[in-house]
Amino acid sequence: MAETIETMGGQAALDHVSRLLSLKVDIRGLEHLPAEGRVVIVANHPTGIGDGVAVYDALKTHRPDIVFYANADAHRVCPRFDDVLIPVEWVEEKRSRERMRLTLSMTREAMEAERALMIFPAGRLAVTDAEGRLSDPPWMSSAVSIARKYGAPIAPIHLEGPWSTLFHLFGRLSRELRDITLFHELLNKTGRRFSLTIGPPVDPEALPRDAEQATEVLKRYVERQLPNEPTSPLT
């Protein structure tokens, strides 16, 4: 698949992967997502690359201008992804000033162009907790900070999809083991069902002033309240 998409533009590559997987995507609350204007979309991250494809499938008609924060490795696979992906080094040891400047510059361009910016703030996959529920690791505060800096509302999404116990076990044991199976885990989503619940927009200024605390409040809402109370605003 990497060889097929490496010469494609980002939009064409996403469409190719979308057709290949043919996901079944259920969505509720689409009316909560602004149809135009800058917005920062945040979601939990239960299954891997398939999460991004599911979000793209669900929102590409409503927000054809959507752009994703994505692992910089995706950009290396398809260098022409610039139109739909903003490369981010989630692993702190791999970050450099040059890469961070590129991320910040492309973020500014997206916000000034009034685009929808999609972020999985965990930057990593969810893990199972003591009760066997999937829960994201702590979210990074970048989504809240970006929304505040550019005066953009936050659109919260709770995402559910098929996840592999073995894949998440690999993730607990070793990042390398998990990464080896990453594309297999993507392809085994072919024809599977995902569901998205979009909550009412969140005013970033209504969140706690501290960005880390605000992010924790937002994470808790997305993971626990939103799937059970899809029309209730964050309180």
Image: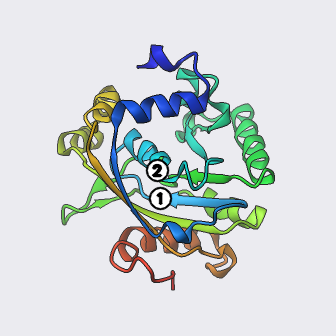
Determine the residue positioned at 25% across, 47% down. Answer: 163
| Residue at (50, 66) in percent of width and height | 30
Question: Given the image, on which type of amino acid does mark 2 rest?
Answer: Val
In-front residue for pair 176/33:
33
Color encoding of the figure = rainbow
Q: Label 1: which residue?
A: 43
Which is more toward the observer, 138 or 40?
A: 40
Q: Is disc 1 surrounded by few (<14), some (14 to 19) or many (20+) residues within 10 Å?
A: many
Relative to 23, say whether 153 is above or below: below
Crowd rating for badge 2 (residues with CA inside 10 Å; few <14, some 14–19, many 20+): many
Point out the tag, 1 or 2, that comes first from the N-terminus: 1
Is there any visible trace of residue 124 in the rendered image?
no
Q: Does 77 appear above or below 122?
A: above
Question: Which residue corresponds to the image point at 30% horizontal and 31% vertical from the top-left?
Answer: 187
SS state under label 2: helix
Q: Residue at x 60, y 75 (%)?
A: 202
Give the residue type that dot 1 points to: Ala
Q: In this rendering, is residue 38 above or below 10?
A: below
Query: Depth check: 195 or 70 in front?
Result: 195
Q: Are marks 1 and 2 in contact (CB under 8 Å)?
A: yes
Disc assigned to residue 187? none
Under circle 1, the secondary element is strand
- Circle 1 or circle 2, nearest the eye: 2
Instruction: Give the residue pinned by disc 2.
Output: 55
